[in-house]
Image (cartoon, coloured by chain):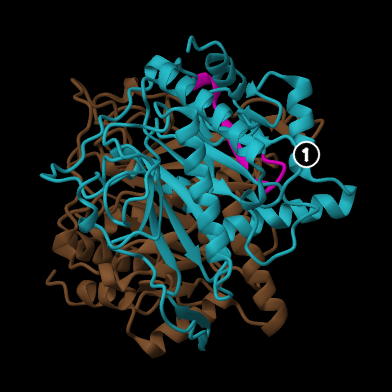
Chain colours: A cyan, B brown
């Protein structure tokens, strides 16, 4: 019998259609195909091909925009938003608009063209998280900006347009609808019970164990109860924390450990799948300290997402979350 | 300068990134590729390959499940939901679940394998809408069901798994989140202003004209102000109406006319693109008569949708809605 499950935070129901359940090998990853490029603009030596860098971590004291870096952040060459200008908020009859003020940046996660986050040493992966933090801290000084969305499209099938491993940052003058819905759900739960709902989820999942993939002193990786996608996994800090960018050094170390572990499990079980992840963190200037809990949501791109899913927010997941977790837990990495 | 626009109903903001604007010919439709099939289970003569029909329109008085039909509705052979059983609602600690009770049906829109909705005669297209209506009226007798979601995936790139032209129906024991958000937005507007927000949109767009694609006595086709996707178009009844299934015959005739016109314009401008459409109509047993307004949202599948779009509900549209409307209006059909 298929099952309907409700996400406790945003109230989204999903169909877990167990009759269609398949084993991991049944998901053939869509073959990634990147447009042929004579020169990768994200590789060392080609720094002049990108706009000048905003941030770079270098082992040496070489000049900016020269090789020697292992993480490098540059403005997107084709930005969806522009950093200069006034917000220009206005109403047009029924409608509301503002100028597309914001930032659109590329976080180059490694100097090696063929590296992936799963193959990076943990220390290098940790530096990617430090770069996210440094950029959020810098951007939150800009009072026009309300939210920093950090995400990664890994593989052409997941929407990446360049092969060289990178994530993206979009800083927005508004809070996206789904982020607002998540925060509202957390606020409601806190008003009712004086507890953070993600803290409740962490406690429940650690006690239950059936959906847990991995755990260390600081973090939990877990398939969510109402997973929208096959092998969707969330990484949550075990201690309550609203703002990703305020994490401590030992927490970033622990995050790199659990994240690396998780990505290697996904690569093993699903044969290096394309995936997306999204950092869910608090809006920049809202006080969400008591009730919101930052986390990362990772979604392997295994099934064709039809228009009706993005049109309705309604998902059919052919894999039982408990089975996905078991496959990942049992992976031989 | 890119622009941020807010959907007045659900409050969703989109980035209209005009710097990336492209002409229609720049969108190469992803070549549809269906798995090779020796026999199409939806073609006349193969009626035994599907579960027994629920509904069929026949010009003759032949027996069910034999050729002679021009619209035929059958249960999905691999249903996401099952029609038999109790709801079995229960709470599991934090979480809520129920059994996957519901219906999953396939509406075969033509007996001709190679037909598309754009090539069907208007009278035949009208019959597809009658079939939607008949199925909704039948399913709303079942008090376990709350919502009937009717949608179409056209082309392999838009998620269709069979080439033979068809739409799908999923009847659910819950109201999907995005439908609930839309209804909440309408209710709020009505409480504030005692007007239906879609009626306001229809009046605004008819007066403004810059986003109008087509119009007849009963319907308007229009690119929405805050379109999420390039060439997204909505078809709205000009008279207020909450329930698609309560439309009159002259309205279905007018709907077939405007819908056929629109699909032919999309085919012309975008070279027969893959697309999805979703019928947005009222939940079955809610009284939304004053404030909710049914309509159809059509989304050509032209761009790669990355995970972050479905993860965040946040969209970047590279085509100005007014330009998309002008291309469609000017199409030589």
Q: Nearer the viewer, residue B200 or B133?
A: B200
Does residue B154 appear in the picture of this structure? yes
x and y percentages locating residue B327 in the rendered image? 20, 73
Describe the element under mark 1 as helix, strand or loop.
helix
Q: Give A274 or A58, whichever is nearer the viewer.
A: A58
Residue shown at 33% from the left, 64% from the top: A79
Taking the view exactly as shown, the residue that stands out farthest to the front is A61
Magenta stretch encompasses residue B329: no
Q: Which residues are magenta?
A: A7-20
Q: Residues within 10 Å of mark 1 (few under 14, many from 20)?
A: some
Looking at the image, how many numbered discs can be counted on the residues? Answer: 1
Q: Where is residue B230, by image quadrant?
A: bottom left
Chain of the residue where label 1 is placed in the rendered structure: A
Question: Residue A284: horizontal and vertical position, in percent?
Answer: 63, 63
- Residue A37 at x, y = what percent? 13, 44
User: Residue at position x 34%, y 59% from top?
Assistant: A53
* Picture layout, residue A287 above or below residue B192: above
Q: Is A17 a magenta residue? A: yes
Q: Which residue position is annotated with label 1?
A: A199
Does any portion of residue B250 appear in the rendered image?
A: no
Q: Nearer the viewer, residue B134 or B28?
A: B28
The N terminus of chain A - image quarter = top right
């Amino acid at each position: 019998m298929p099952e309907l499950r409700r996400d406790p935070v945003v109230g989204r129901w999903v169909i877990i259609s167990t009759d269609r359940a398949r084993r991991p090998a049944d998901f053939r990853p869509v073959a990634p195909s990147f447009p042929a490029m004579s020169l990768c603009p994200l590789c060392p030596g080609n720094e002049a091909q990108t706009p000048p860098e905003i941030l770079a971590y270098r082992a040496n004291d070489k000049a900016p925009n020269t090789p020697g870096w292992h993480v490098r952040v540059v403005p997107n060459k084709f930005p969806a938003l522009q950093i200069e200008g006034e917000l220009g908020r206005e109403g047009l009859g029924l409608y509301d608009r503002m100028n597309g003020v914001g930032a659109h940046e590329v976080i180059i996660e490694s100097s090696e063209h063929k590296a992936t986050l799963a193959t990076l040493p943990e220390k290098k992966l940790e530096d990617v998280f430090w770069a996210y933090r440094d950029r959020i801290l810098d951007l939150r000084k800009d009072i026009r900006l309300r939210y920093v969305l950090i995400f990664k499209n890994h593989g052409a099938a997941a929407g990446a347009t360049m092969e060289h491993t990178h994530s993206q940052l979009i800083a927005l003058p508004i809070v996206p609808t789904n982020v607002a819905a998540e925060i509202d759900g957390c606020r409601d739960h806190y008003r009712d019970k004086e507890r953070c709902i993600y803290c409740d989820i962490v406690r429940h999942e650690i006690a239950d164990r059936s959906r847990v993939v991995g755990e260390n002193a600081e973090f939990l990786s877990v398939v969510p109860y109402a997973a929208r996608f096959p092998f969707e996994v969330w990484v949550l800090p075990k201690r309550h924390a609203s703002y990703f960018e305020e994490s401590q050094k030992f927490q970033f170390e622990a995050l790199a450990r659990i994240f690396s572990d998780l990505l290697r499990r996904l690569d093993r079980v699903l044969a290096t799948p394309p995936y997306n992840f999204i950092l869910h963190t608090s809006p920049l200037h809202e006080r969400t300290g008591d009730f919101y809990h930052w986390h990362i949501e990772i979604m392997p791109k295994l099934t064709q997402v039809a228009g009706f899913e993005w049109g309705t927010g309604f998902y059919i997941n052919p894999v039982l979350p408990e089975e996905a977790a078991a496959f990942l837990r049992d992976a031989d990495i």
